[in-house]
Image (cartoon, rainbow, N blue to C red):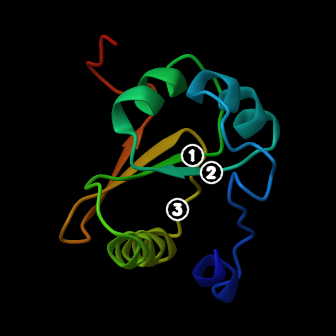
């Protein structure tokens, strides 16, 4: 969070929002109603859940499940890509792979059958 704050982004962790322990499905209304861009490494569950939402503030997936330092490095790479692109993340899926490459995809995901 400190990294996002240092770059001028508002950020919170589910722990600080009293949402720790919520199921993924139970988190979705909180995420959408709060207009949060959600950051996770749980691609399978959240790509499926976001398919059910017409309008959202974006989903950022850090693809490899790695240690905290690696997650921070990849999160910073994602912020770099978002800032360079000037991206508005509404209805966007941003995926960051192990080398820090960010891929942007519009929702609904074309050809995605669920």
How far apart marks 1 and 2 lie (CA) works out to 5 Å
How far apart marks 1 and 3 lie (CA) works out to 10 Å
Identify which residue, 38 or 101, lies in the foreground.
Answer: 38
Side of 92 where 100 appears, left or right? left
| Residue 87: mark | 3
Which residue bears the numbered disc 1? 58
Report helix, strand or loop for mark 2. loop
Numbered disc in front, either 3 or 2: 2
Give above or below for 63 relative to 9: above
| Position of residue 75 measured from the top left corner of the image (x, y, whole percent) | 43, 70
Residue at image x 34%, y 30%?
44
Report helix, strand or loop for mark 3. loop
Asked if the residue under mark 2 is in contact with the one under mark 1, i.e. CB atoms within 8 Å, the reply is yes
Quadrant of residue 32 within the rendered picture: top right
Which residue bears the numbered disc 2? 37
Label 3 neighbourhood size at 10 Å, few (<14), some (14-19), many (20+)? few
- Mark closest to the chain's N terminus, 1 or 3: 1
Residue at image x 65%, y 82%?
2
């Amino acid at each position: 969070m400190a990294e996002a704050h240092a770059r001028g982004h508002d950020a919170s962790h589910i722990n600080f929002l009293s949402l720790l322990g919520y199921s993924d499905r139970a988190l979705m209304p909180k995420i959408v109603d709060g207009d949060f861009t959600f950051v996770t490494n749980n691609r399978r569950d959240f790509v499926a859940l976001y398919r059910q939402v017409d309008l959202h503030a974006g989903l950022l997936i850090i693809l490899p499940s790695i240690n905290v330092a690696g997650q921070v490095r990849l999160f910073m790479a994602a912020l770099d890509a978002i800032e360079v692109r000037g991206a508005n993340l509404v209805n966007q899926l941003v995926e960051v792979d192990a080398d820090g490459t960010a891929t942007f995809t519009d929702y609904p995901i074309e050809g995605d059958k669920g």
